[in-house]
Amino acid sequence: MGKKLKAYIYSIQMLLESGETIGNLEALKQELLTEIGFWQHERLIHLLVTILFALLTMAVFMVLLFYRELSMLILLTALLALMIPYIRHYYILENGVQTLYTFYEELTRRENKIPPSCVPALQGVSVKPVSKRE
């Protein structure tokens, strides 16, 4: 999922940075809104899974405090090792959706010819370049 989101961000970023006039800006904005909706749903699901996993990890830790068994220690170690990829993946989703919001605001600015100072979210926001990875 992370690769797919990064590829989509890269394609929109290249389109915006190309400086070319975008033919059907309204259709692109609508497609971007649809994608944002999909990624928001994905982000919510991963947030819930991450929270559930963290609660399970804490429960196993509490059990380990009272019942010092090797099996509980192994389970806690496995859960802690899995928390790192879960948190990393959620981080990628969160930052990706925030980047898509910025792109939508940029398209809105271009469509209505609104100066950047009138779109509050664009003030001081810079989108870091995304490199295309295969």
Image (cartoon, grey):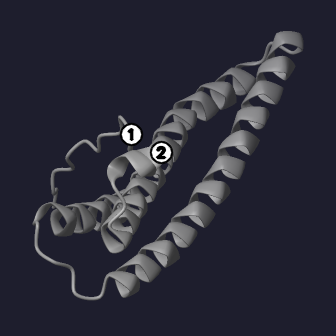
Q: Secondary structure at mark 1?
A: loop
Callout 2 amino acid: Pro
Res 70 → quadrant: top right
Q: Residue at x 30, y 67 (%)?
A: 110
Residue 62 horizontal/vertical position (percent): 84, 19
Q: Residues within 10 Å of mark 1 (few under 14, many from 20)?
A: few
Q: Secondary structure at mark 2?
A: helix
Location of the C terminus (image quadrant): bottom left
Q: Residues within 10 Å of mark 2 (few under 14, many from 20)?
A: few
Q: Residue at x 74, y 25 (%)?
A: 72
Res 124 → quadrant: top left
Residue 119 horizontal/vertical position (percent): 44, 51
Question: In this rendering, does residue 57 appear at all?
Answer: yes
Callout 1 amino acid: Gln
User: Residue at label 2?
Assistant: 120
- The front one of 61 and 134 is 134
Location of the N terminus (image quadrant): bottom left
Question: In this rendering, does residue 92 appear at all?
Answer: no
- Residue 55 tag number: none
- CA–CA distance in space, label 1 to label 2: 6 Å
- In this rendering, would 105 be left or right of 66? left
Pick out the residue farthest to the right.
Answer: 66
Residues at discs 1 and 2 in contact (Cβ within 8 Å):
yes
User: Residue at label 1?
Assistant: 123
Q: Residue at x 34, y 50 (%)?
A: 116
Q: Residue at x 78, y 18 (%)?
A: 69
Residue 61 horizontal/vertical position (percent): 77, 20
- The front one of 25 and 70 is 25
- The front one of 25 and 85 is 25
- In this rendering, would 60 be left or right of 7? right
Q: Identify whether 103 is placed above or below 75.
A: below
